[in-house]
Amino acid sequence: MKKQGVISFGEAFVDYVSVDPTNTTFQPFLGGATVNVAAGTSRLGIPTYYLCKLGTDSISQFVEQELKKEGINTEYAVHTDEKKICGVYVHTNEAGERLFHSYINDTPNELLTAEEVRKDVFEKTKVFYFGSGTLFHEKAKATTETCLKYAKANGNLIAFDTNIRLKRWESESNCRQTITSFLKKADIVKIAEDELYFLTETDFLEEGLKKLDQIPFLFVTMGEKGSYCFMRGKRFFAPAPMVKAIDTNGAGDAFMSALLYCFHENGIPSSQPKLTKYLQFANHVGAAATTQIGSLSVKLDLVNLKKQFE
C-alpha cells in the first residue's frame, strides 16, 4: 500500500469575533494552529487527517462541518457528550481593531487519550505533525507520546512546531523543559526566532543553534526578514517576499503547511538547491497568508504558487 497523507494532532478552537461595535453579536470561526496547518495541507492537495476530541453539541457539529468543508478527514476524531470546544472571544474597539477579550474552556480535561488513538491511521500516512499547544496538560502529553510511538513505528516523518503560548503553562521553566524534550523526537522542527532564544536561554542565533544541532531539519522563521534552515550543520537562508501585510495571524501555520507539502510530495531534500526551494516556497505561502484578514478565511492562489516552485 502506498502511504499518503498528513496527520495533524491537536485541539480545535472556535474564535467568536464581534461583528458590531457594541460587542454583543459574534460570528464563529474555526481556529487553532493545528487546524490551520491541517487546512493548509488539505488545500495543497494532501490527504489530511485531524486527531482530536469533539463533543456532540451544536458547536462541535459546527467544527466538524468546517473541517469537512476543508476536505479534512475526521474519522479518527473521538466524540463524547461531555466535551465542549474551547472558545476565544474577540472584541472590536472604537477604531475597529480586533482585540483578545477572553478564553473559555469548560472541559479542560476532556482531551483525546492515548487509548483512543487508532494505530491504523499511521499505517497509511507519511507525516505526523503536532504542536506544543496541548503539551502543558499531562493527558495530552501522554497522548502525544503514543502518537509519536506509532508514527516512528510506521516510518512517518515527524514534524513539530514549537508555537509557544506561555499563558497556558504553569511556569516558563516547565514550558521550556517540556518543549525541549519533544524537540529531540522530531525530524522537522519549525521555531520562531524569539522562541529559539527562549528555549535555549541564549541571546544570539549562533548560540541557540549549537544547542539544537541534533535536529535533522530545523527551520527558524524571522517574519519579514525571511527564514533559515539548518541541515547537518549547514545553514541556508531565504528572504521573505515583499508583501503588504494586513494580518500576520496564521502566517507561521501557512509556512508549516507548505513545508509539510514539500516533504510529503518531494521527500527528504538531499541537496542545498532542493532544500532552498522548500524554504522559498514556505516563505511565499506564509507571506501570502498575511495579505488578507483571518487564517482559514484566507484563500490563496496555491496553484500558481506551487507552479512557481515545481
Image (spheres, helix red, strand yellow):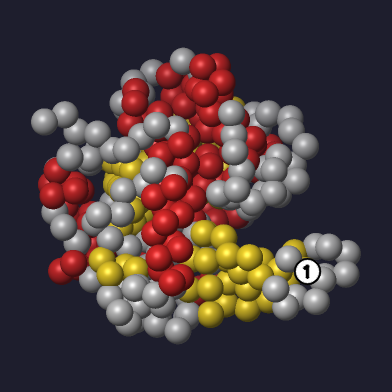
Total numbered badges shown on the rendered structure: 1
Location of the N terminus by quadrant is top left
Is residue 175 at least partly visible in the picture?
no
Q: Residue at x 39, y 43 (%)?
A: 71
Q: Residue under label 1, please give it.
A: 20
Q: Is residue 249 above or below residue 232?
A: below
Please tell me which residue is depicted at 45% across the width and 84% down the height of the picture.
106
Farthest right residue? 95
Q: Please tell me whether mark 1 sits on a helix, a strand or a loop.
A: loop
Q: Quadrant of residue 243?
A: top right
Residue 252 appears in the rendering: yes
Q: Amino acid at mark 1?
A: Asp
Q: Is residue 146 left or right of residue 203?
A: left
Residue at (43% x, 19% y) in the render: 274
Is 106 in front, or is 260? 106
Q: Position of residue 136 (x, y in %)?
A: 40, 73
Q: Is residue 221 above or below residue 270?
A: below
Which residue corresponds to the image point at 56% horizontal and 21% vertical from the top-left? 304
Q: Is residue 3 above or below residue 192?
A: above
Coordinates of residue 42 in the picture (x, y in percent): 41, 39
Q: Residues within 10 Å of mark 1 (few under 14, many from 20)?
A: few
Q: Position of residue 170 (x, y in %)?
A: 47, 81
Front-most of residues 299 and 135 = 299
Estimate the x, y position of residue 143 in percent, counting from the top left. Answer: 25, 66
